[in-house]
Image (cartoon, rainbow, N blue to C red):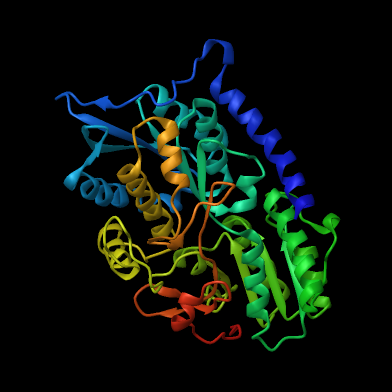
Amino acid sequence: MKKLKKVAALVLAAVFAIGLLAACGNKGGDTPAPAGSGSSSSAGGEAVIKIGYVSPVTGPLSHFSVGMDNTIKNVEAKMNEKGYDIGGVHYSVKIIKGDSESDPVKAAEVAKKLVQSDGCQILLGEWTPDTMNPVSEAAEQLKVPCIVDGGPDISWTAAGPYDYSFACAMRYEKQVREYFEAFEKMNTNKKIGLVLDSSMDGVGMLELVKQMAAEYGYTIVNPDANELAQEGATDFTAIVQKIQAEGADIMLASLLGFQLSGLWANVDSLGYHPKFVILSKGMHFSSDVLTLTNAAGECTGAYTCIETQWTREYPFTSSLLGKTAEELSADFEENVKEAPDVTIGWDYVFFDLIDQALKTTKSLSSEDIVAALEAIQGFDCIYGTLSCDDEHVFETPITFGQWVPDEKWGLHKVVTSCSSVPEAEAILQPQVEMQWK
């Protein structure tokens, strides 16, 4: 793990240093906002706490932000029912959104604007390291409290340590272990065909799968780093041919959505039909999985698997809204007009944590808000029971799920393994083999 973090840190340092330099311009002529710069005021003179919320509203990651406006509407109304009394002043809350455009450089630029031009005293950054890391880097530079989420811990912690930033993040190691715990329930030949690219996530996944394959007694068909596809590749014919020739019962791919679509075309054309398929990272939405078809146009994505970062069946309740996972999912269906998905838990956990911090902070100084966030331990919220650790990570639950047919939305995800989340045992469903057409 130390070796992996070192590799990740080098990659992230290069990528995001370039991004921040491009976004921030000449450092000497651009003075950061002072820490704890106090409240802003509306036209009527009311004391207002401004929260800047950076998310990929446009670009290839935009589907992750479809519920953003609905979330802002719900939490802003609730936070302003009573407001916050801090240091003898009564505050309301204003949430200002910014579009990262699914681009790291833009994410840093927008985060900086939200603080220095719009007067935001707290930053949020959401969805993949492309938004999470640049927003955190900007927050560190500007000395502004920040929470990010929507990605694995190692992609974020490798760029730390952080003084002002926090992350709600799943543990990448636990994610991969959950795969193997699920594999143990399946009747397979214990051969895994890996389909990864040379991105940071791909390299990280390779190292963890190799470690755990040895621990659990599985064989990886293509375990060498030089067998990774080029980053952003969409044709994986050579890799699929190799794992097909080895007869691997399990195919595990960790790729972006457009790459997984390319992989699926390769699998169909070659007639490779493994018993179990895990399409990690890029297939979090039922609408995406429904696009996985054969040459006849029939959906063959049913019964594929993916890590489960959120489900409406989780037995958790928002501390801010007092609504259960099921109630927030029903609200999402009604107002967003889409199938409830992974974004719900991530979107609302931000505001459960901020609400708690604003209730307990001594003042609106950055240092006091950071101290209030650091003090959160054993906190029951929409993502279970969270605690801040020494790396400023609030570890979120990770389970293993499978896409099964659904009359309303075509497919929905069920939980089939939950080795690290005992609370989810009550909702477990049996694992089903792929049913190829």
Image position, residue 134 (x, y; %): 55, 36
* Residue occupying the point 68% across, 39% down: 12
* Residue occupying the point 55% across, 76% down: 418
User: Could you tell me which quadrant the C terminus lies in?
Assistant: bottom right
Looking at this view, is 270 or 376 the one in front?
376
Q: Identify the residue at the far top of this view.
A: 29
344 sits left or right of 80 in the view: right
Image position, residue 398 (x, y; %): 54, 66
Image position, residue 1 (x, y; %): 75, 55
Image position, residue 125 (x, y; %): 47, 42
Decide: is 30 above or below 94. above
27 sits left or right of 112 in the view: right
For the image, the number of numbered tags is: 0
74 sits left or right of 27 in the view: left
Decide: is 411 above or below 64. below
Looking at this view, is 370 or 135 the one in front?
370
Q: Can you see residue 26?
A: no
* Residue occupying the point 71% across, 77% down: 250
17 sits left or right of 385 in the view: right
Q: Identify the residue at the far left of this view.
A: 44
Q: Can you see residue 2?
A: yes
* Residue occupying the point 79% across, 56% down: 228
Decide: is 117 above or below 408. above
